[in-house]
Amino acid sequence: MGVAMRQDRRALAGLFDALIFLAIASLVSVSLLSVLGGPSPAGGHQGERVDASHTALLRSTVPDEKGNQVTIEELFMLQLADRVDIEGNITSILDLLLPGTEWRWSVQIGSKNWSFGRTEIPPGPVYCSIVRAPFNGFEVIYRLECWAAQS
């Protein structure tokens, strides 16, 4: 009789563990569906594409004034951008990553500003990606604005 009771307790404990696991899995699934499964804003895919392109641009490397490879993000953080001609690199990267669009990319560090691409934004939907990075007591703000190319 003692062996049967031990097996019953083990089986009951196994069922209890399975029930707890299923309850947690259900809770996680419902939470994820409510967060990720809601209606996406118009152009959600395009917004993700602009964000990914902006990240790729910031991580792209260019040679600094001494010929060492440095990311575009670091080039502006260290305020070396004035000494290096990188406009061609920025243009080629964004034109490759965002075909069929026009864009404006800007960087602001305190009172210093750099801007590349189109100066005027036409009416219509504009997708914007902003990256903020604290550095040496300043906030570096990288902004990519992108819209459909005008024919």
Image (spheres, rainbow, N blue to C red):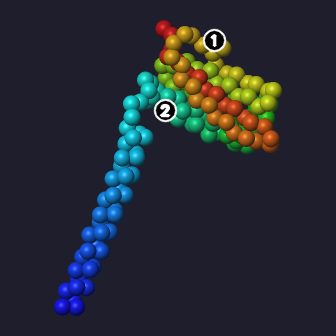
Based on the displayed image, in which of its 4 quarters is residue 116 positioned? top right
Identify which residue, 129 or 26, lies in the foreground.
26
| Residue 104 rendering spot, x and y as whole percentages | 62, 21
Q: Identify which residue is drawn at 73% across, 41% down.
A: 134
Q: Is residue 142 above or below residue 13?
A: above
User: Is residue 114 shown above or below 68?
Assistant: above
How crowded pointer 2 is (Cα within 10 Å; few <14, some 14-19, many 20+) is rated as some
Work out how far the residue at label 2 is from the one at label 1, CA to CA, in angstroms. 23 Å
Which residue is under mark 1? 120
Residue identified by numbered label 2: 48
**For numbered disc 1, what is the local secondary structure?**
loop
Residue 92 located left or right of residue 19? right
35 relative position to 4: left or right: right
Residue 85 visible, this orientation: no
Q: Residue at x 22, y 80 (%)?
A: 8
Which amino acid lies under the numbered mark 2 shown in the image of this protein?
Answer: Glu
- Residue 136 placement (x, y as % from top left): 80, 43
Question: In x, y percent, where is residue 97?
Answer: 52, 29
Residue 42, percent from left and from top: 43, 23
Q: On the image, which quarter does residue 16 sit in?
A: bottom left
Q: Which residue type does callout 1 highlight?
A: Glu
| Secondary structure found at label 2 | helix
Quarter of the image for the N terminus: give it: bottom left
